[in-house]
Amino acid sequence: MVQERLWWLSSSKCKFDSLNSKPVTLRWRYPPHGWLKFNVSGMATEEATGCGGVPRDKEGTITALFPGPCDAIDAYSAELGAIITALDVIIKIGWRGSSLIIVEIGSQVAYNWLLNKDRRPWSQQTTFTDMERRQACVGEVALSKAE
């Protein structure tokens, strides 16, 4: 099994761990017609944090790829950093209005924070304010949780 957390931080450190692997069926769901879907992830180890994402169109075609480091203190804030990075990519490329956007994340904790403002940690308030500012620049963004 590929160690995903390492892939986001450094794809050259990615390795297969067949001794501890169990078969896993992963299924990517296509976005609705007219939507662009970003799958994003944030990872953290003791040494570094990173985030990245892959936007795909309705046929599943990858339209960009953005891996890299992020300024985060843990995996949850790295996941939020991945969302902000995706929104920055959308703004920079100029996708506003050309497609409706879905940003899909893997962290249940971060997803709950997005849904319920009362559960957001005080230490992340600036991050959420930055995210909401970017969402306003992008237009309609649907946030979803990966299965």
Image: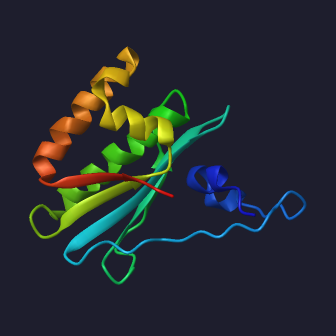
**Residue most extreme to the bottom:** 59
In the rendered structure, the answer to whether residue 6 lies left or right of residue 87 reads: right
**Residue most extreme to the left:** 97
In the rendered structure, the answer to whether residue 24 lies left or right of residue 107 reads: right
Residue 77, by quadrant, is top left
> In what quadrant of the picture does the N terminus appear?
bottom right
In the depicted structure, whether residue 119 falls above or below residue 101:
above
In the depicted structure, whether residue 9 falls above or below residue 96:
above
Q: How many marks?
A: 0
Residue sitting at x 27%, y 56%? 89
Residue sitting at x 59%, y 49%? 9
Residue 136, by quadrant, is top left
In the depicted structure, whether residue 113 falls above or below residue 89:
above
Residue sitting at x 28%, y 30%? 128
Q: Position of residue 39 (x, y in %)?
A: 42, 60
Nearer to the camera, 102 or 4: 102
In the rendered structure, the answer to whether residue 6 lies left or right of residue 130 reads: right
Q: Position of residue 94 (x, y in %)?
A: 15, 63
Residue sitting at x 43%, y 37%? 110
Q: Position of residue 111 (x, y in %)?
A: 41, 41
**Residue most extreme to the top:** 122
Nearer to the camera, 71 or 77: 77
Please name the colour scheme applied to the rendered image. rainbow
In the rendered structure, the answer to whether residue 95 lies left or right of residue 13 reads: left
Q: Position of residue 144 (x, y in %)?
A: 36, 53
Nearer to the camera, 4 or 106: 106
